[in-house]
Amino acid sequence: MGKSSKDKRDAYYRLAKEEGWRARSAYKLLQLDEEFNLFENVTRVVDLCAAPGSWSQVLSRVLIQGEKFGRAGWEQKQKETREYVLGRSKSTAAEDVAPASEDGGAVKDVQRPEKRQGVQRPEKRQGVRIVAIDLQPMSPLEGVTTLRADITHPSTVPLMLHALDPDTYDPASTTSSPSAPVDLVISDGAPDVTGLHDLDIYVQSQLLWAALNLALCVLKPGGKFVAKIFRGKDVDLLFAQLKLVFSRVRVAKPRSSRASSIEAFVVCEGFCPPQGFKPSLEKPLGAGAALPVPDEKPEATKPSRTVRPDGVVEIDLGDESDEEGIEEGGPRWIAPFLACGDLSAYDADATYALPKDRVSLDPVQPPTAPPYKRALEMRKLAGGAYGKTKGQEQKE
């Protein structure tokens, strides 16, 4: 997220720099948490495809520093303001008078209200482990362990387990220890889009498959998995596959995500691996590893299709089409699609007028190793910007 961009009129782009986020994608995770309460009772998180680190920054500020955002942050701010006003109304006149300085003048109290009234900031939580993994280098964050590794390689799992539990790590183990499993695995990774939707969806599905296989190795029973997907014509197959290992699968579209984008986020809750299933990146799911088949299969009602006289096709999903039927493995496999974010929030596709006195802010964190770094170096050697070489400039 640079200083100048074609998206500089985007409200979330400007707001991210004003509030100190590394990228506007931080608001996507915040809105997902506001809708699904992802961070409740979470102490161990793995962030896949983490660079430049906006999602890891959210994890650090929420889980470690104890900050609140969105509606919870607004309610907390209103509560602190109310307590401050009530405290000032009960204070005596002597306390409101500023002490006199040596030269006889009044000394103004320039302290912030929370310091003046004794309001303490939230204390940092202890025992929270956050591991961020990416092939690209990432600038450090408070309380976040960064690993430069490949999420598709089996050697990444031991490195991640050692970063999560350096004291109790067992090199002979290929999965997370029962005493300290992972509560949440998130992935905001996406390929460099080409504009060919079929190709982009295929590459994104492979990235999602790699993130899911890594999550199966470290998630605890009942854990959560959140990942970016590209919604296409065969996305219902993805929902059905995720339903094999998670009790609840939903798809969300945050308000900070542009409606013109085909991206969405799959939110999987209640990790419940089949009995006898042993996850491993050496034999990932779908590449030689098969789920154990139970001896007795429950009889499921197959969906029926009926064509009405007016030409409308009706699909009967069975009797267990409610939420209970979904969690109990009923015949319904269509994932609910939810929109996240307050309707009063900014619209990602809208263009907001910029004030005349607006000053362009510097990026919060410049790219550490951008993929276009080599191209910039070659252009500099060739004579500078606009594709001109030194020879062309002399001729002109």
Image (cartoon, rainbow, N blue to C red):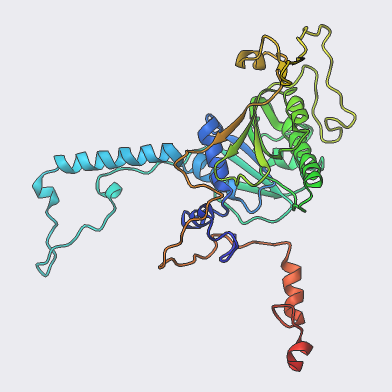
Count how many numbered circles sit on residues in the image.
0
User: Where residue 46 sits in the image (x, y, percent)?
Assistant: 65, 39
Quarter of the image with the N terminus in it: bottom right
Please, is residue 178 above or below residue 48 in the view? above
User: Where residue 133 sits in the image (x, y, percent)?
Assistant: 69, 46
Tell me if I can see residue 179 in this picture. no
Residue at 47% from the left image edge and 38% from the top image edge:
342
Which residue is situated farthest in the front direction here?
A: 310
Residue at 84% from the left image edge and 8% from the top image edge:
295
Tell me if I can see residue 200 in this picture. yes
Q: Residue 339 appears in which quarter of the rendering?
A: top right
Nearer to the camera, 368 or 300: 300
Relative to residue 211, is residue 100 drawn left or right?
left
Which residue is situated farthest in the right direction here?
A: 288
Nearer to the camera, 365 or 32: 32
Relative to residue 275, is residue 52 drawn left or right?
left
User: Where residue 186 sits in the image (x, y, percent)?
Assistant: 65, 38
